[in-house]
Image (cartoon, rainbow, N blue to C red):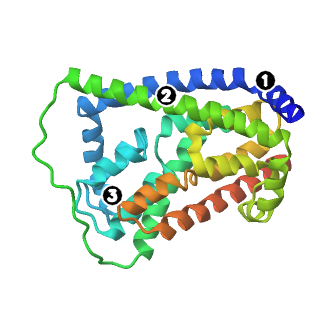
Amino acid sequence: MNVFFTRAVTAVKPVLPVAARTCWWLVRLMVVVSLLVEILRYTGVIAWMSGVLSPFFELMGLPGEASLAFISGYFVNVYAAIAVMSGLDLSARSVTILAVMVLCAHNMIVESAVQKKCGTPMLRIFIIRTLSAVILGFTLNALLPEGGQVLAAVKKTAPVDPGIWYLFCNWLTSIIWLILKMVALIFGLSVFQRLLSEFGVIRWLSRLFRHLLKVFGLPARTSFLWIVANVLGLAYGAAVMIEETETGKISRDDADLLNHHIAVSHSNLEDVLLLYAAGGAFWWMLLSRWLMAIVLVWERRVEKLLNHLKII
């Protein structure tokens, strides 16, 4: 027992400073981004952007006001998108299309910054996530049967301006809670990952998922990070992903391939279940993004091969 405890403590000690640095970097980024989004929301910029995009969303079989839900999720997170969706009269078909788009492209600034530190250019992540959301929106509009029951929207009274001080206090409360939760998860997950690595569990997981990851076009050694991204998402799993990449436990090329997969398919536990509860079709939300992730990874593999052969 003493040997086990000593081995665990020795393994965990080096990861704590890394987790602390990641927390500090991520907290600063999230505070700045979330405050900026609140300012844009308060000044009406986000509402204006959604108005501009409304005609485009109608081409995907969605009502124009659905664009506000997408923009909210794009800059903030899935929770923000669901909050807007709850006030709209949407059919299950429309919720499914909109949910897939939000799952592909949400919390873009923070999550793209995380993926940049893991080896993929931020602009590339922005482009592939945005294009994937649009492509899947048009595809699902063509594939899903028309009609379906319209889900009841939450009835809301006319909006009242609560004042900037109230909004600031509300933002401060939510960001403090988010920071506390994130710090706890990042440290907990970093310690957990190091213990799994020390006692050989990650090697076992690599063997367990190697066939599935082979279909996805991913190396078996990325299996643990794939699990982290699918269960916890990109923001909460940031410390482990960055630490694995920066210490060379997985190569930059392998991390780049993983980034192309998890860019459009992550947090498949909490986020998908939340949107399922909001009326989305579970299997369409999951499998459509898995297929897009497969396309993105294999396209990236071909691109790397052609670059290596100096064809492009």
Mark earlier in primary sequence (3, 2):
3
Tell how many labels: 3
Q: Which picture quadrant has residue 299?
A: bottom right
Mark 1, residues whose alpha carbon is within 10 Å: few (<14), some, or many (≥20)? Answer: few
Q: Left of 236 or right of it: where is 301?
A: right
Mark 3 — residue? 57
Q: Left of 221 or right of it: where is 110?
A: left
Q: CA distance from mark 1 to mark 3?
A: 49 Å
Q: Nearer the viewer, mark 1 or mark 3?
A: 1
x, y percent for residue 109: 49, 35
Q: Is residue 104 above or below residue 120?
A: below
Mark earlier in primary sequence (1, 3):
1
Q: CA distance from mark 2 to mark 1?
A: 22 Å
Tell me what residue is drawn at x 70 percent, y 46 percent: 225
Residue type at numbered disc 1: Pro
Mark earlier in primary sequence (2, 1):
1
Residue type at numbered disc 2: Leu
Mark 2 — residue? 180
Name of the residue lying farthest toward the right: 3
- Label placed on residue 14: 1
x, y percent for residue 53: 31, 49
Mark 2, residues whose alpha carbon is within 10 Å: few (<14), some, or many (≥20)? Answer: few
Tell me what residue is drawn at x 69 percent, y 34 percent: 190
Labelled pair 1, 3 in contact (Cβ < 8 Å): no
On the rendered image, what quadrant is the N terminus found in? top right
- Label placed on residue 298: none
